[in-house]
Image (cartoon, helix red, strand yellow):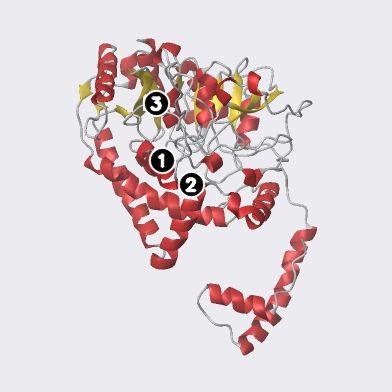
Amino acid sequence: MPVRMPTPQDLRDAGRRFGFDVHDEEVDGFSQYIREMLPAYRRLDELVAPTVPVKYPRRDFGARPATDDNRDNGWAWRCSIPGAPDGPLTGKTVGLKDHVRVAGIPMMNSSSLMEGYVPTEDATIVTRLLDAGAEIIGKVVNGSHCFDAIGLSIYPGPQPINPSGPATGRYCAGGSSNGSAVVVANGDADITMGGDQGGSIRIPAACDLRPDSAYRAGRSRPDGRSYRTDDENGARLRAGVAGRGRCGRSGPAPERCPGQGLHRPARSGCRRPADRHTHSGFRPCSIDARGGEAARVLERVGATLADVSVPMHLDGNAILWPLMIQGGNETNKQDGWGHGWSGHYALDHVNFMHRAIKARANDLPLGLKLVLLLGEYTYQRYGMHYYAKAQNLTRALRAAYERIFEDVDVLLMPTIPFTAPPMPEEELSPYEFLSIFANMIHNTGSFNATGHPALTVPCGEHEGLPIGLQLVGRHFEDDVLLRAAYAYEQS
């Protein structure tokens, strides 16, 4: 794509977008100097950028599953990519959320905007899973562009159905990692990978996973994952895939990550009181009651319980929203990748997104349109004020939780304040769809802002629908959460 010389009108238009005029004498000066700078861009066109080789070549790229071979519509693509013969995940099957790049396999991210994109490289997590011995058996459905906490914006469809709902009705699977939860709930994969920027793993896990199935899922970091069978899988996965990748923001180092040491006494993960947070407006009251019963189960296996209060928790979403809206707006305006971070950029994806948004912006999902509209409006009207203030308040919110963690090891609370809603019989209005999203992240979003590790375990039912219990821990103490979840699971 050779870089052409901007015309005088190009320069005037660019200046106008920033609110200043470019006068004729300035146009001449800028044009002369830009002409001297363009050879650098042309030299970039000549240079060969480093690429990521595909470590595990695949002979069969698979296909989209037939309807009768796709229980509850959880799968987006089926394939078989075997990994190394030995490793902590040997014998485990894995499904990947369809926002993960797998070389040679289409990536839709549940959006018609992405139709036709086939990655040429594997994401870091793909190579890590295969190095650890896992077999990747497909990609799972997710809410469009991962901005859907209820799981209804699915392209090309059909919508995933909650496999744990009563036989008398059809219920939503949550979102945005709805296919991840559906597939593990049905036992069609041992492990599924997701992504959680506001609750997108924990919410579908809480909606879809029953305690009698012994499933456990969810973390609050963007490298999220869902696990099936028991927390041993969680520890194996963490040990197998953790560590620094091709992005300068990644971590922690593998030696900080738990392996398989979950069989120590439960009290080692809960030496100080575990917290039963009871001040977050849960409804109905039976959900809070189930959380109390789950806390008492941990007490029987060695935990000490204490009621604590974090008043600022109620402001968590007010702090998170400007970060998601304005930050998401800037990221999506920059072809979905953003600026300023060091690491490997997938040029095929960057270029595809740039062309697709220019050609088919009307295909953007409702949630992402909200991000772009409100993010652009607040920036144009108020600049960076609310984003910057939210970042500063995030430190205060983190400190409020840290003060509690001086006395407790684990915070307990319902993952979402209600059970999975029924599938709508008619298409929701834009307001109805967006309002459900906001309510779903009532208890989950704060910990995405602060970076505290969080997971959810199934702890009971209400009117035949699963209830999730959220466990939250200190930074980099994922092993404590896994031991607490394992102790609860084993009891």
Residue 28, by quadrant, is: bottom right
Q: Amino acid at mark 1?
A: Phe
Q: Residues within 10 Å of mark 3 (few under 14, many from 20)?
A: many
Q: CA distance from mark 3 to mark 2?
A: 25 Å
| Picture coordinates of residue 218, whole percent (x, y) | 45, 28
Q: CA distance from mark 3 to mark 1?
A: 18 Å
Residue at the image point whose x is 34% and y is 57% from the top = 389
Q: Which mark sits nearer the N-terminus, 3 or 2?
A: 2
Give the residue at x 33% y 29%: 418
Measure the alpha-carbon separation of dots 1 and 2. Answer: 9 Å
Check the image and report above or below for 209 versus 139: above
State if disc 1 and disc 3 touch (CB < 8 Å): no
Number of numbered labels in the structure image: 3
Return the mark for residue 456: 3
Q: Position of residue 72 (x, y in %)?
A: 55, 22
Q: Secondary structure at mark 3?
A: strand
Q: Is residue 204 visible?
A: yes
Instruction: For the C terminus, give its image quadrant.
Output: top left
Element on which disc 2 rests: helix
| Label 1 crowd (10 A; few <14 / some 14-19 / many >=20) | many
- What residue is shown with label 2? 367
* Circle 1/circle 2 CB separation < 8 Å: yes
Choose the circle earlier in sequence order: 1 or 2: 2
Name which residue type carries label 3. Thr
User: How dense is the environment of label 2, judged by Cα within 10 Å: few (below 14), some, or many (20 and up)?
Assistant: many
